[in-house]
Image (cartoon, rainbow, N blue to C red):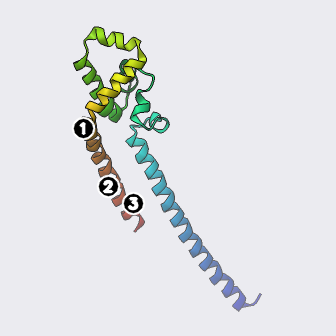
Amino acid sequence: MESSELILLVIAGIIGLFILVRIAKTLFKVAFIALFALGAYYLWTSGSVDGLIEPTMESMFKNTTITELMDKHCSPSKKDGMKCQCIVTPVYNDLNMRFSKTELTQLEQNKKRMVEEMMSSMKTQKKEMEACLKSDESTVMKVINMAKGLFKMVSS
């Protein structure tokens, strides 16, 4: 091998390494953004896989009673912050205002009627629920914006 071929080989190797590093940086940035988006979504759903399986509020109330929902989302051992505070609690409070304890006990035994009443409560509490969800959304948006600033600082 001549010296000119060796020099060209070294230059080609340096250029190839430079291109490879640029591609790796871009892939890392894309992977970081994707992981961050998944993490934000996970936090948005209050760290619960249930939100991935049952994305709508109607399906959350389907074939269940308010007591079961309170146990599932608002128990101290497994507290789903946003679902408990913004969805289940307003419906629970509305049902307690509209029905006596004995009527609620009777409703608990008839799941079809319970679901109907919970959906009715959800409709009457819709504004309160939306306001609560928007206040939680602003907190999540602050975290996302903070992470964007951190990402820009790291990438530059």
Compared across the picture, whether 29 is left or right of 87 comes to: right
Compared across the picture, whether 49 is left or right of 78 comes to: right
Spatial CA distance of label 1 from label 2 is: 29 Å
Numbered disc 1: secondary structure:
helix
Numbered disc 3: secondary structure:
helix
Q: Disc 1, disc 2: CB below 8 Å?
A: no
Q: Quadrant of residue 78?
A: top left
**Residue type for callout 1:** Lys
User: In this figure, which residue is indicated by the disc labeled 2?
Assistant: 146
**Residue type for callout 2:** Met
Rendered residue at 54%/63% (across/down):
27
User: In this figure, which residue is indicated by the disc labeled 1?
Assistant: 127
Compared across the picture, whether 54 is left or right of 13 comes to: left
Which image quarter holds the C terminus? bottom left
**Residue type for callout 3:** Phe
Spatial CA distance of label 1 from label 3 is: 35 Å
Q: Disc 2, disc 3: CB below 8 Å?
A: no
Q: Earlier in the sequence, mark 1 or mark 2?
A: 1
Rendered residue at 39%/34% (across/down):
57
Which image quarter holds the N terminus? bottom right
Whether residue 152 is visible to the viewer of this picture, yes or no, is yes
Which residue occupies the extreme left position in the image?
Answer: 97
- The circle on residue 151 is 3
Residue nearest the viewer, comparing 138 with 25: 138
Q: Earlier in the sequence, mark 1 or mark 3?
A: 1
